Amino acid sequence: MQEIPFRTLLYRYFFFSWLYKDVTRGNVVERAAARRWNREHAHWLLKYMARWLWCGLVFYGLGGFVEWVLEAPQLSVLFYIPSALSVPVNAVIGAAWVGLKVLPAAL
């Protein structure tokens, strides 16, 4: 078994684009197969949403801790910003999940 670098593992843990196929390339049959593949693997998006949600909550908690307990509001920004960025990432993941699971396949 080939050893995967930590950087690649970290990327795959937080970003899901490596898991899905491009539906804009190939002929009609290849595009339909890619769409079917993506729909079958849409359940993984919920895992990615949970990961980003927990990371956002942890960073928000750390920001609150640094701001209130350590009384360093300037330093707390380093934790609040990643927490705030987890919200739009979860919105994009949610939209992708709705597009793959909820909307009809005929689109």
Image (tube, rainbow, N blue to C red):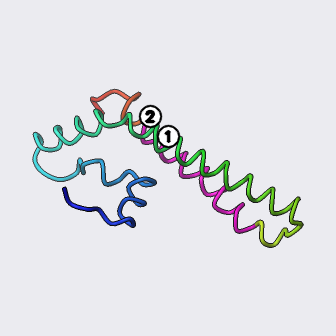
Q: Eyeballing the image, is 8 above or below 37?
A: below
Say which residue appears at 12% left-offset and 42% top-offset.
Answer: 28
Q: Eyeballing the image, is 54 above or below 15?
A: above
Say which residue appears at 85% left-offset and 70% top-offset.
Answer: 72
Quarter of the image for residue 39 reads top left
Taken as a whole, is the magenta stretch helix, strand or loop? helix
Q: In the image, 29: left or right of 61?
A: left
Circle 1: is it few (<14), some (14-19), or many (20+) Cα within 10 Å? some
- Along the line of sight, the residue nearer the viewer: 5 or 45: 5
Kind of residue at badge 2: Val
Q: CA distance from mark 1 to mark 2?
A: 6 Å
Q: Eyeballing the image, is 81 above or below 38?
A: below
Say which residue appears at 67% left-offset and 51% top-offset.
Answer: 58
- Residue 94: image tag: 1
- Along the line of sight, the residue nearer the viewer: 67 or 93: 67
Kind of residue at badge 1: Gly
Quarter of the image for residue 29 reads top left
* Magenta residues (range): 77-98
Give the labeled residue for mark 2.
98
**Labelled pair 1, 2 in contact (Cβ < 8 Å):** yes
